[in-house]
Image (tube, rainbow, N blue to C red):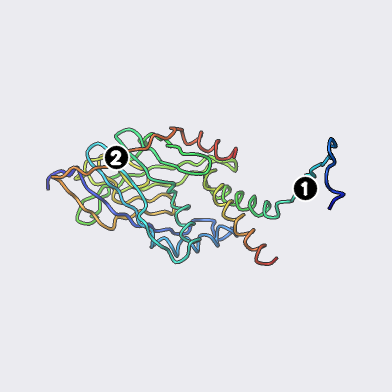
Amino acid sequence: MANDCVQKNEINDLKIENIVIDDPCKDEQDAAVNECLSNGCSEKEAFYFGAVAWGNCMKELSIRA
Amino acid sequence: MSQINNGKIEYGLHISTFEGLEKTTRMKVAYVKAMENSPFINFELLFNSNESFFYIKDGLGLDDQGYLYAKLFSGYEGVIFQNEEFSYSEIKGEIGNFLIKKNKKKDWTLENETKEINGFVCFKATAVKTVINSAGVFHFPVIAWYCPQIPLSYGPNGYGGLPGLILELQVRNILFGVKKIDLKPNKNILVPQRKEFKVVSEKEYEDILLKK
């Protein structure tokens, strides 16, 4: 613990790593949006339909985890 | 019967299948839930001689998701204010608050058919709803039954522009049917005030939504 402390006048160059997490439900969302659009949904309707599909997918994944 | 200029109409919702639904996967599942829950969704239209206000009545469906799907597929996005020329849909969401302004539908074909709805003689009018999206251009039939005894150009879900109140409206596979008519010929129904949200067109709203 003492070794982690910054000494006076020292700067610890701490780099924050950017961790990119894949969106595991993006494909499901896109598939839902495209299905809706190809059946005559407006862009708005398809957007919301895709959002619900994404939410369902994430819920399913969290149950399985 | 004297002309009526004030009142309240309650509409029920009926969702049926559409051609091609059986070939879908996700929509088919969503539609089953929507159809089960649509009987639990009711709307109300308050109107006077100057304006109308259309909103969904509080209620519960069989399940939250089915209720949500039924609302989504009905095309209802939020309360709708109408005057003689325009309709304004109020949208409140994470991306902001807006009033989507649309011209009242004018390209109706007035047909010769009549039918009686809740004791009122109604006339048929037809139109086409065109949807243009990234997958193509789609045309869906619209059938409205309007009642000249209520000589106001309002109706459910922002539809109007006919020489009488619309008591029944079908847009593709979505039907708004009258459940209750409460007319007050000698009383002025007060319609809620429109909020001062940013006024946008439907296209502008879609662009904002899809950029988010």
| Label 2 residue SS | loop
Say whether mark 1 and mark 2 are on the same chain.
no
Which residue shows up at 58% across the image and 40% down it? B210
C-alpha distance separating marks 2 and 1: 58 Å
Above or below for A55 versus A16: below
Which residue shows up at 35% across the image and 50% down it? B169
The residue beneath circle 2 is B162
Q: Amino acid at mark 2?
A: Leu
The residue beneath circle 1 is A19
Which residue shows up at 38% across the image and 54% down it? B175
Q: Indicate the position of residue B146 as horizontal and vertical percent values.
A: 27, 46
Find residue B106 and name its label: none
Q: Quadrant of the C terminus of chain A?
A: bottom right
| Label 1 residue SS | loop
Check disc 2: other Cα within 10 Å, few if <14, some if 14-19, many if 20+: many
Check disc 1: other Cα within 10 Å, few if <14, some if 14-19, many if 20+: few
Which image quadrant is residue B27 in?
bottom right
Identify which residue, B115 or B131, lies in the foreground: B131
Q: Report the number of discs.
A: 2
Subunit of mark 1? A
Q: Indicate the position of residue B83 as horizontal and vertical percent values.
A: 30, 36
Subunit of mark 2? B
Tell whether B26 sits left or right of B116. right
For the residues labelled 2 and 1, say whether their Cβ atoms are less than 8 Å apart: no
Q: Residue furthest front?
A: A8
Of badges 2 and 1, the one in the foreground is 1
Q: Indicate the position of residue B97 as horizontal and vertical percent values.
A: 46, 39
Which residue shows up at 31% across the image and 39% down it? B193
Q: Amino acid at mark 1?
A: Ile
Tell whether B156 sits left or right of B25. left
